[in-house]
Image: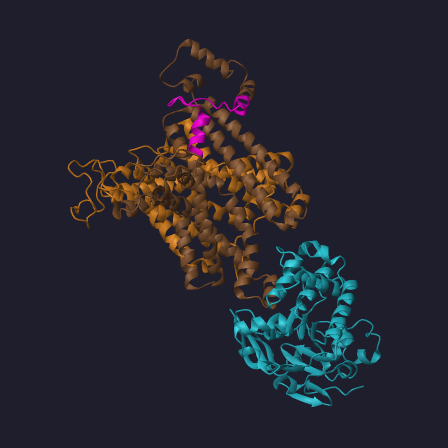
Chain colours: A cyan, B orange, C brown
């Protein structure tokens, strides 16, 4: 079980300390999928890097814990983390073309993922097996390819093969399809779904596209400016959104605009994500929220339970 | 290296001198570099007034006197005397004059020729550009000392010829830089716009394009000073540049070689002057680059 | 890769032609009669004079002279030294290995020390080590090596008496040339350890003097190249796989950071020659650099002319070899074979 508990992360910048994740909590079991949705700058990627222990040097975890089966990863030593990365926790990234090392063959990078965790035998056969698994044709030939010889979709399949090489318990996929062609996106998502099912992995799928999580996730977490605004089972969040922001994200989906009920309430999300160095007072969303009142402008909302859903809002919507 | 060359980072002159100075003055290395260069420039200009002796004046009976702090030193000759009894301090001060002039001339000659060729090549394109860049490739791939030796062999050993020889080896840097910048500027909307209003090539080059190439050229010019000073001193040391009794640091070093055991100060001090001045120009050039390159400004 | 090599050849061939034109033009541009320059000041009989004129075709048009010059060079006829009377080709071949040995050792020093220093500086960016290394390397980069060599002599030879001041090996040893590299030939000659040590202590100061500027350049290049690479996505991927920090930096990072460094080192052949001219003059190293300077000072025109041609040729060939190695080592280029 992977548990993130009251996690806060901030960056030291030239203009001062910038808080990017604030008091974030969630739990993920093996075999389940958590979808984290948010605009860029909402802190979703930073969260995943914090879990992996790969935050850049100017980032600080200011509070909280990341528990992996009872072990706090934030207190783990670098050598423990090295063992855990790849073996228990794996991650794939947004741009597969820049995430693979241009100077080494696919085979080298794939085999290295295994040797790093003590696998010594049949490396080549295992690598071929993995490539076959992720749906790469002619895997024997592809082993000696360099990344620049692959298409974006192929490269992401290689990244996935690398991530699952040591059968991790949890896989974090950070915008895995954003850099790919639309037609390829569906294939990669289907592949992730298949792997997750067959291997019983816990999957964290990070995306800015609420449509993707609607299709993939068991649970959904909506992030905005480092805060979890809404968290709950997929059907609850998608069909009965309580937070105005969630509803706005859903309304922006193609095909939803025709729905009169959505249109009338909050057709689009005007404005942009706040500057995290000059955060607004009160609710982070209030400058962009049409329901905002004096309380929203002055007092930060507390997390409250509405049915099965956690919401951070002074004026949660009534389900329709 | 292909003749295409990498397109240099876009640099533009900062909007105001104050802004430039703010960035520049926070770079400690750059300020040190500026101080060094200013000091030597002062020595060069004021040499006749501050040097205690004429650099060619021979004091009989004061041969190979060590500096004043060593045993046997004389207060009259602060840094000692050389093998024929000339005051080392005075020669070093006049040497600053020679080296600053050398650096200046090398930069002026190579900058003028290099900028011209770069502008013409970049603006004209086609075979003119190809010929110029091919020639620059040749100049760049041959060791600079060989070209210098050729020039000195043909024209004879003298300071002026050494300056000429070194200038030739510095030209390609300017040509590539200016050409790359011209290619960038040429495709910018304001240049195209002014062409549609009928601005001729001369006007294009001198009014529109040239001022926008200034920042990188200034940086390269500063670094050209250090190249020029170093290489002309090297030729002087080899006997292929300034000839004795010119008070040129490289030539002085060459003369002092045989006294390395008996009069080490004759070896250490002129070289130290070269090192410090070259370092000063390099620090200054790096500082200018950082202050003039908007990409690095945060 | 073929295209890349053809492009490089497209630079090398004009450069080679340029070098022949420069060498050919040299002796003709010197004021005075080229034949008299080639015969030297000792004078010669009218028959010898006429024979020389005919040999270089000096009574024929300039273009014919040029092609004659090329033909002679292609046949290995580079003329004879006025001073020694030896064929220039022999003199060159006697001295070239000495310069090559010195240059290779100096470059190896620069690479083997400069790369690790640059990597550590990049990894510990803005640390005291980083600042110290960058300051020292800027001094090294600004160094007048003809002075630096003298300072090394002053300290290690004159003050400490640790190293000899000139030559390649102690006179007591007689080492016939085999590879031309004394560090190898002493074993072939059966002189053993003492001779090897003698060759090594003769080599160490010149190699430091010649290697200083390349070392400073390599350290600075490696640092900036490594800094760029450290921010790349694939470095994060490598860590996410569970690789150790060392492996991530030295395998995944360095492999990519080295590409621009190697390119620069490859292009150093020319500046090594420039440095060798100075270093060999200071340390009386019997290589082509000192040979060339002495010939200029002695107005030994045939040696200067052909020496420049041969040295340029050597530099061009070395640059081409580096290009081939570079293309071979770079998968993006190799892939297009």
Residue A173 visible in this rendered orientation of the protein? yes
- From the viewer's perspective, tell me whether residue A37 is left or right of residue C283: right
* Magenta span: C69-96
Q: Position of residue A115 (x, y in %)?
A: 61, 65
Q: Report the front residue among A237 and A128.
A: A128
Q: Report the front residue among C208 and A26.
A: C208
Residue B43 visible in this rendered orientation of the protein? no
From this view, report whether residue C300 is shown above or below residue A21.
Answer: above
Q: Position of residue C111 (x, y in %)?
A: 47, 50
- From the viewer's perspective, tell me whether residue A89 is left or right of residue A184: left
Q: Position of residue C216 (x, y in %)?
A: 44, 50
Write the residue at 54% across / 57% down.
C254
Q: Report the front residue among A220 and C255.
A: C255
Q: Report the front residue among A217 and A306.
A: A217
Quadrant the N terminus of chain A occupies: bottom right
Residue B153 falls in which quadrant of the image?
Answer: top left
Residue B209 falls in which quadrant of the image?
Answer: top right
Residue A63 falls in which quadrant of the image?
Answer: bottom right
Residue B187 is a magenta residue:
no
From this view, report whether residue A147 is shown above or below residue B177.
Answer: below
- From the viewer's perspective, tell me whether residue B232 is left or right of residue A114: left
Quadrant the C terminus of chain A occupies: bottom right
From this view, report whether residue A211 is shown above or below residue C89.
Answer: below
From this view, report whether residue B66 is shown above or below residue C291.
Answer: below
């Amino acid at each position: 079980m992977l548990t993130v508990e009251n996690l806060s992360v901030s960056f030291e910048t030239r203009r001062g300390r910038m808080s990017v994740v604030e008091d974030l909590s969630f739990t993920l079991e093996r075999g389940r999928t958590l979808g984290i949705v948010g605009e860029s700058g909402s802190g979703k990627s930073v969260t995943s890097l914090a879990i992996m222990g790969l935050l850049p040097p100017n980032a600080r975890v200011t509070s909280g814990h990341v528990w992996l089966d009872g072990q706090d990863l934030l207190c783990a030593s670098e050598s423990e983390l090295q063992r855990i990365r790849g073996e228990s926790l794996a991650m794939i990234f947004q741009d597969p073309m820049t995430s693979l090392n241009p100077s080494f063959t696919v085979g080298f990078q794939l085999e290295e993922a295994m040797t790093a965790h003590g696998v010594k035998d049949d490396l080549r056969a295992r690598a071929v097996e993995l490539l076959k698994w992720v749906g790469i044709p002619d895997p024997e030939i592809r082993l000696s390819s360099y990344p620049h010889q692959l298409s974006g979709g192929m490269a992401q399949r290689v990244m996935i093969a690398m991530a699952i090489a040591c059968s991790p318990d949890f896989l974090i996929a950070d915008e895995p399809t954003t850099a790919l062609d639309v037609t390829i996106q569906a294939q990669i998502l289907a592949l992730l779904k298949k792997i997750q099912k067959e291997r019983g992995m816990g999957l964290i799928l990070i995306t800015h596209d609420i449509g993707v999580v609607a299709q993939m996730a068991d649970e959904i977490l909506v992030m905005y400016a480092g805060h979890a605004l809404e968290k709950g089972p997929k059907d609850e969040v998608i069909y009965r959104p309580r937070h105005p922001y969630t509803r706005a994200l859903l309304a922006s989906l193609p095909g939803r605009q025709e729905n009169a009920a959505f249109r009338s309430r909050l057709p689009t999300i005007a404005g942009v994500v706040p500057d995290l160095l000059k955060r607004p007072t009160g609710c982070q969303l209030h400058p962009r929220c049409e329901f905002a009142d004096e309380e929203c402008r002055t007092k930060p909302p507390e997390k409250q339970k509405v049915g099965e859903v956690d919401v951070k809002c002074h004026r949660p919507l009534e389900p329709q | 290296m292909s003749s295409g060359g990498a397109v240099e980072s876009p640099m533009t002159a900062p909007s105001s001198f104050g802004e430039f100075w703010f960035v520049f003055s926070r770079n400690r290395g750059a300020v040190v570099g500026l101080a060094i260069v200013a000091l030597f420039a002062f020595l060069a200009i004021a040499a006749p007034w501050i040097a205690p002796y004429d650099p060619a004046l021979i004091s009989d009976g004061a041969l190979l006197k060590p500096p004043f702090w060593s045993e046997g030193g004389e207060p009259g000759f602060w840094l000692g005397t050389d093998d024929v009894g000339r005051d080392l301090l005075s020669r070093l001060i006049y040497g600053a004059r020679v080296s600053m002039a050398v650096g200046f001339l090398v930069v002026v000659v190579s900058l003028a020729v290099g900028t011209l060729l770069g502008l013409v090549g970049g603006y004209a394109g086609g075979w003119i550009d190809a010929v110029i860049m091919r020639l620059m490739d040749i100049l760049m791939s041959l060791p600079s000392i060989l070209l210098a030796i050729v020039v000195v062999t043909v024209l004879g050993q003298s300071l002026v010829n050494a300056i000429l020889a070194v200038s030739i080896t510095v030209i390609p840097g300017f040509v590539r830089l200016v050409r790359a910048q011209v290619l960038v500027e040429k495709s910018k909307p304001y240049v195209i716009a002014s062409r549609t209003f009928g601005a001729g090539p001369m006007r294009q080059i001198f009014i529109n394009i040239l001022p926008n190439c200034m920042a990188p050229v200034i940086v390269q010019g500063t670094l050209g000073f250090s190249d020029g000073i170093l290489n002309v001193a090297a030729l002087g040391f080899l006997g292929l540049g300034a000839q004795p009794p010119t008070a040129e640091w490289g030539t002085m070093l060459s003369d002092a070689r045989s006294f390395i055991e008996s009069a080490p100060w004759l070896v250490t001090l002129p070289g130290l002057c070269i090192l410090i001045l070259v370092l000063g120009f390099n620090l200054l050039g790096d500082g200018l680059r950082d202050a003039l390159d908007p990409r690095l400004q945060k | 890769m073929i295209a890349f090599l053809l492009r490089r050849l497209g630079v090398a061939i004009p450069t080679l032609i340029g070098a022949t034109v420069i060498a050919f033009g040299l002796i003709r541009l010197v004021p005075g009669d080229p034949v008299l320059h080639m015969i030297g000041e000792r004078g010669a009989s009218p028959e010898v004079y006429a024979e020389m004129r005919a040999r270089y075709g000096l009574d024929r048009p300039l273009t014919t002279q040029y092609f004659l010059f090329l033909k002679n060079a292609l046949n290995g006829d580079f003329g004879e030294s006025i001073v020694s009377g030896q064929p220039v080709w022999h003199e060159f071949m006697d001295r070239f290995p000495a310069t090559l040995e010195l240059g290779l050792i100096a470059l190896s020093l620069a690479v083997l020390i400069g790369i690790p220093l640059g990597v550590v500086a990049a990894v510990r960016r803005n640390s005291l080590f980083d600042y110290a290394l960058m300051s020292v390397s800027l001094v090294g980069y600004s160094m007048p090596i003809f002075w630096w060599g003298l300072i090394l002599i002053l300290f290690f030879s004159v003050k400490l008496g640790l190293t000899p001041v000139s030559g390649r090996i102690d006179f007591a040893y007689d080492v016939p040339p085999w590879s031309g590299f004394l560090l190898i030939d002493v074993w072939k000659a059966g002189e053993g350890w003492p001779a090897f040590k003698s060759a090594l202590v003769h080599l160490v100061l010149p190699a430091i003097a010649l290697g200083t500027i390349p070392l400073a350049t390599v350290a600075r290049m490696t640092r900036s190249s490594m800094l760029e690479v450290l921010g790349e996505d694939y470095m994060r991927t490598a860590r996410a796989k569970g690789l150790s920090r060392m492996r991530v930096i030295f395998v995944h990072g360095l492999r990519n950071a080295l590409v621009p460094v190697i390119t620069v080192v490859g292009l150093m052949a020319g500046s090594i020659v420039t440095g060798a001219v100075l270093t060999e003059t200071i340390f009386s190293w019997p290589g082509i650099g000192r040979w060339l300077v002495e010939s200029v000072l002695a107005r030994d025109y045939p040696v200067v002319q052909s020496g420049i041609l041969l040295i340029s040729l050597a530099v061009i060939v070395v640059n081409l070899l580096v290009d081939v190695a570079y293309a071979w080592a770079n998968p993006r280029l190799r892939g297009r074979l």
